[in-house]
Image (cartoon, helix red, strand yellow):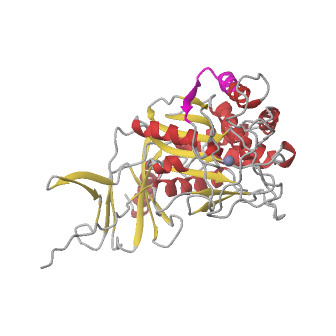
């Protein structure tokens, strides 16, 4: 063979090893994105508003008003979307919380509404899309600013008074319900879980109870996409922007949540090129909370999607109405969620970049990253458990320690080690992800360095 021919053959061999659609939008995911509907989101928001209030302490047995009617309606909607959805109330008997400003001044029943779309080949891996359906109105004049960090919370008003909560968090609930409708017509490798939480306004109660139970049951939750206040595209200061969404993730850098935030940006912007997915490298907004945090506290990857244009005057107020929300904006953020969740639910499991062994009777975690034989290379190894039949291979990613996003990416094929010659492991951050034949990418598993343990030194 002439040299040119052999180069040509080599090119084709290499090309054949690459997944056909690598880095190209997966048409199935694009279809899902296109199916998210303005009209359906409008219907959901108007119906949620029609219950008057969804405060967990509001009337439970009125057929058209209050939290009881709202949760039954959400439950029935989930049931109607597809027979494949396993719908249930995740129910708790909540004890009264003591204290002068308590938002739970008496015992009350709390119901999260849950719809599970069971996966096929990676059923045990779960991806949660959540929002909170409860609402609240606080005793402060309309137009007030939210409490500054450290301020005592204002008192809650009578829970049976109107608390429309269309943006906070009818918007997140609409995202969850619309994606349950759209995604339940597809089959995914992993399990998707759609949750409308309750008791968020009383201190993240429904999500905390759920996350604790999931941890106790050793559930494998890969990702939680929590949507709270995704309906506002004009801030109280008049700032307007409807092509940006903030994704909050907790520290440290390269935490599971941080990798998930990078994933939402990468995939969200791939399928919605007009959107800016802004990763905010902090757990949440100042002095305020959301249902992703209890999942972080249990060690799960969980992020909050939220509008950067908040109108504080409407929040926790009777003016948080349909008229004051933006359906087109909610639809865009719902599409970002749909692209990320569908991609992840079809993607292979993320590879494992460390090994747990034993030294002197102690458990030790060893990173599968070395300087290689030369001692001047970056030698990466990773492990996989039951590789998927449609696995195409892995990509090695790297970036400078000060860079927010992965800067380089090399598809290395269906191997479990790769060496970057003459690359110092001290200067860069590395990671690896799995990719299937349709181009669906897993989360990146970074090679993260654990902090050095403090040593007790004896002196005399
Ligand atoms: Zn909220």
Residue 176 relative to residue 374: left or right: right
Q: Position of residue 12 (x, y in %)?
A: 45, 52
Q: Is residue 12 left or right of residue 312?
A: left
Quick one: quadrant of the C terminus? bottom left
Q: Is residue 279 magenta?
A: no
Residue 216, above or below 151: above
Residue 314, horizontal then vertical, whole percent = 80, 52
In the rendered view of the protein, which quadrant contains the N terminus?
Answer: bottom left
The residue positioned 56% from the left and 48% from the top of the image is 292
Outermost residue toward the right?
Answer: 323
Which of the 4 quarters of the picture holds residue 142?
Answer: bottom right
The residue under the point 15% across, 52% down is 361
Q: Position of residue 122 (x, y in %)?
A: 44, 34
Q: Is residue 79 magenta?
A: yes
Residue sitting at 63 percent across and 28 percent down? 185
- Name which residue lies at 65% across and 62% down: 151
- Examine the image and state in which quarter residue 318 appears: top right
Residue range of the region highlighted in magenta in the rendering: 75-95
Q: Is residue 314 left or right of residue 345?
A: right
Residue toward you, 323 or 182: 323
Count how many numbered circles sit on residues in the image: 0
């Amino acid at each position: 063979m002439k040299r040119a021919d052999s180069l040509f053959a080599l090119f084709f061999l290499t090309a054949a090893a690459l997944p056909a659609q690598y880095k190209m939008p997966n048409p199935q995911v694009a279809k899902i994105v296109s199916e998210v509907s303005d009209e359906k989101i409008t219907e959901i928001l108007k119906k949620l508003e029609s219950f008057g209030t969804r405060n967990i302490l509001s009337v439970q047995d009125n057929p058209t008003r209050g939290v009881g009617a709202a949760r039954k309606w959400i439950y029935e909607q989930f049931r109607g979307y597809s027979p494949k959805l396993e719908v249930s109330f995740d129910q708790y008997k909540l004890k009264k919380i003591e204290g002068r400003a308590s938002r739970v001044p008496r015992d009350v029943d709390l119901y999260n509404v849950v719809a599970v779309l069971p996966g096929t080949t990676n059923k045990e891996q779960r991806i949660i899309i959540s929002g909170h359906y409860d609402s609240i109105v606080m005793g402060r004049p309309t137009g007030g600013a939210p409490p500054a960090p450290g301020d005592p919370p204002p008192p809650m008003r009578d829970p049976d008074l109107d608390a429309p909560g269309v943006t906070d968090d009818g918007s997140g609930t609409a995202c969850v319900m619309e994606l349950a409708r759209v995604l339940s017509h597809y089959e995914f490798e992993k399990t998707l879980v759609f949750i409308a939480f309750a008791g968020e306004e009383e201190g993240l109660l429904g999500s905390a109870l759920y996350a604790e139970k999931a941890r106790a049951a050793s559930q494998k939750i890969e990702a939680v996409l929590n949507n709270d206040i995704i309906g506002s595209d004009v801030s109280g200061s008049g700032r307007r922007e409807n092509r940006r969404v903030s994704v909050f993730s907790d520290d440290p850098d390269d935490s599971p949540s941080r990798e998930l935030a990078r994933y939402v940006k990468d995939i969200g912007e791939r399928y919605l090129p007009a959107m800016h997915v802004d990763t905010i490298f902090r757990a949440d907004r100042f002095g305020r909370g959301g249902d992703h945090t209890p999942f972080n506290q249990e060690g799960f990857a969980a992020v909050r999607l939220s509008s950067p244009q908040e109108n504080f005057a409407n929040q926790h107020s009777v003016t948080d109405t349909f008229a004051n929300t933006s359906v087109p904006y909610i639809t865009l953020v719902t599409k970002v969620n749909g692209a990320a969740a569908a991609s992840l639910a079809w993607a292979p499991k993320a590879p494992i970049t460390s090994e747990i062994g034993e030294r002197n009777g102690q458990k030790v975690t060893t990173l599968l990253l070395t300087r290689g034989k030369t001692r001047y290379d970056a030698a990466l190894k990773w492990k996989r458990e039951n590789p998927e039949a449609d696995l195409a291979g892995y990509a090695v990613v790297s970036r400078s320690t000060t860079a927010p996003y992965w800067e380089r990416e090399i598809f290395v094929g269906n191997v479990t080690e790769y060496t970057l010659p003459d690359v110092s492991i001290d200067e860069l951050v590395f990671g690896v992800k799995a990719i299937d034949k349709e181009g669906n990418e897993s989360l990146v598993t970074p090679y993260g360095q654990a902090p050095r343990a403090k040593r007790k030194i004896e002196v005399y």
